[in-house]
Image (tube, rainbow, N blue to C red):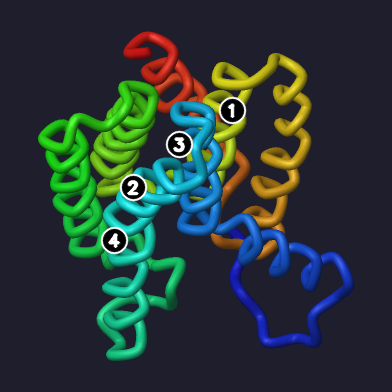
């Protein structure tokens, strides 16, 4: 992997930073939760409630923990760039996501929403296990997995969004946060562990 420098950012680097933030995993999970919950209910109050539950336990609260730790220097930034710093935030995310899944089951959530949470949790566990030894790209995994889940839920035309997922992967390599191999493997894990599990469970 290339060494980071403090040189003035190029236009490509600025675009890469924008893509990494706009399509960060926590942002994608919020949007995905709402869109899947809407398809499951077609009722705004219910979609908002179920989507919010998934978003809070799988995105918002875990991201709050990550930002809190980053500000205290416990890991490198809110994207947790250092591999060795990922254990605590990922363990927290798994625990909170598991809690969210339990709540969905207890509250008798629509099965489509439950399937989403199961798929995200499976993908998270697999990528977390790998990243202990090798820094696989969470950005790529979540982006690719989200595209697969949306395509299965709505229409195959949404597979075209893989172009966006590819751009997100490019941004991670451009910012020197991941190698090309780490992005490719992350994407495959997202497609199989996220989209594949979702289609199977649903």
For label 3, count other residues whose C-alpha is less than 10 Å away and answer few (under 14), some (14-19) or many (20+). many
**Distance from Cα at disc 3 to Cα at disc 1:** 11 Å
- At 66% across and 80% down in the image, what residue appears? 5
Which residue does the numbered mark 4 point to in the structure image? 86
Which residue does the numbered mark 3 point to in the structure image? 37
Please name whichever residue, 157 or 185, is drawn nearer the observer in this view of the structure: 157
Residue 36 appears in the rendering? yes
Considering the numbered disc 4 on the image, is that residue within a helix, a strand or a loop?
A: loop
For label 2, count other residues whose C-alpha is less than 10 Å away and answer few (under 14), some (14-19) or many (20+). many
- At 86% across and 75% down in the image, what residue appears? 10
- At 57% across and 41% down in the image, what residue appears? 143
For label 4, count other residues whose C-alpha is less than 10 Å away and answer few (under 14), some (14-19) or many (20+). many
Q: Looking at the image, do the residues carrying marks 4 and 1 touch, with CB atoms under 8 Å apart?
A: no
**Distance from Cα at disc 4 to Cα at disc 1:** 28 Å
Q: Looking at the image, do the residues carrying marks 2 and 3 touch, with CB atoms under 8 Å apart?
A: yes
Which of the two marks, 3 or 1, is nearer to us in this view?
3
Please name whichever residue, 119 or 84, is drawn nearer the observer in this view of the structure: 119
Q: Earlier in the sequence, mark 3 or mark 1?
A: 3
Q: Earlier in the sequence, mark 2 or mark 3?
A: 3
- Residue 140 in percent (x, y) is at 56, 42
Which of the two marks, 4 or 1, is nearer to us in this view?
1
Residue 54 badge:
2
Q: Is residue 100 left or right of residue 47?
A: left
Q: Earlier in the sequence, mark 1 or mark 2?
A: 2
């Amino acid at each position: 992997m290339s060494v980071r420098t403090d040189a003035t950012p190029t236009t490509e680097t600025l675009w890469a930073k924008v893509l990494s933030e706009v399509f960060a995993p926590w942002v994608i999970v919020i949007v995905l939760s709402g869109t899947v919950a809407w398809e499951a209910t077609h009722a705004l109050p219910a979609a908002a409630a179920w989507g919010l539950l998934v978003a809070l336990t799988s995105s918002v609260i875990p991201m709050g923990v990550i930002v809190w730790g980053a500000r205290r220097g416990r890991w490198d930034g809110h994207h947790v760039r250092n591999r060795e710093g990922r254990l605590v935030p990922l363990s927290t995310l798994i625990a909170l996501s598991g809690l969210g899944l339990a709540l969905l089951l207890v509250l008798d959530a629509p099965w489509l929403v439950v399937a989403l949470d199961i798929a995200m949790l499976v993908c998270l566990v697999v990528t977390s296990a790998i990243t202990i030894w090798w820094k696989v790209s969470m950005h790529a995994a979540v982006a690719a997995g989200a595209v697969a889940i949306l395509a299965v839920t709505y229409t195959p035309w949404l597979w075209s969004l893989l172009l966006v997922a590819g751009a997100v992967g490019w941004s991670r390599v451009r910012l020197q946060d991941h190698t090309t191999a780490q992005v490719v493997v992350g994407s495959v894990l997202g497609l199989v562990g996220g989209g594949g599990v979702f289609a199977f469970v649903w």
